[in-house]
Image: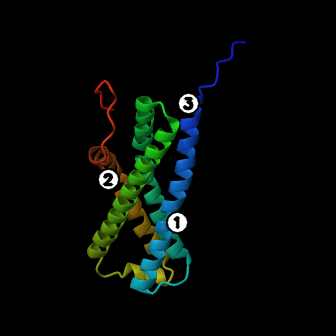
Amino acid sequence: MNLQPINLTAALFSLFQIATGLVFGTGVLFLTFKFFLFWADKRYGIKSFNTSFSILIGSILFSVGLLLQEAISPAILTIQNLYQQSQDMGFTLLWGTIYMLIYFALSMVFSFCVIFLAYFLFTVLTRKINEMDEIKHDNIAISIILGVVIIVMVLLVKGGFSQLVDAIIPVPELHSGIRL
């Protein structure tokens, strides 16, 4: 039996991708969670969790996660490209972390915009229903519908978001001038 040697660089990049995904992903989800709790309390007086509010928050967190997923691949591609240029793991991890922060921050801002826009458009179209008041009074049906609207809107825009990230954040060029 002929065993292949371990590709240490590939293994390190994989571990870095897992670690940054966990750390930054958890951080972004936590900030999102806290922000929407604050927003619901200040804007609508929702101070405690009920099933309806939990469904809505879960839908929001799921939506943010979907957009974060779109930011991971370009960030890892950038990190691999940086390593190919420098062959210095410390330099790569430092700049890779900076790029990862930029990608995740952009994802968080974009996801907040999409969530608020979906929420706003839906509430404008359903003027006879005060969705947040219904959620405050634990109307599960309204919460499910609003949560699904938010998730579907994110699914519809995530391809465009991926292209936007590629267009806004420059990917370092290889020495040969080839741009990834």
Q: Mark 3 to mark 1: distance in Å?
A: 31 Å
In the rendered image, residue 139, in percent from the top left (x then y), is placed at 48, 79
Q: Amino acid at mark 3?
A: Thr
Going by the picture, which residue comes out furthest to the top? 1
In the rendered image, residue 14, in percent from the top left (x then y), is placed at 56, 38
Residue drawn at point x = 40 percent, y = 69 percent: 146
Residue marked by disc 1: 30
Q: Amino acid at mark 2?
A: Val
Going by the picture, which residue comes out furthest to the bottom? 45
Q: Which of the numbered marks, if any, corresponds to residue 9? A: 3
Residue drawn at point x = 39 percent, y = 58 percent: 105
Name which of mark 3 and mark 1 comes first in the sequence: 3
43 and 108: which one is in front? 108
Q: Which of the numbered marks, if any, corresponds to residue 157? A: 2
Secondary structure, mark 2, is helix
Few, some or many C-alpha atoms within 10 Å of disc 3 (few <14, some 14-19, many ≥20)? few
Going by the picture, which residue comes out furthest to the right? 1
Q: Amino acid at mark 1?
A: Phe
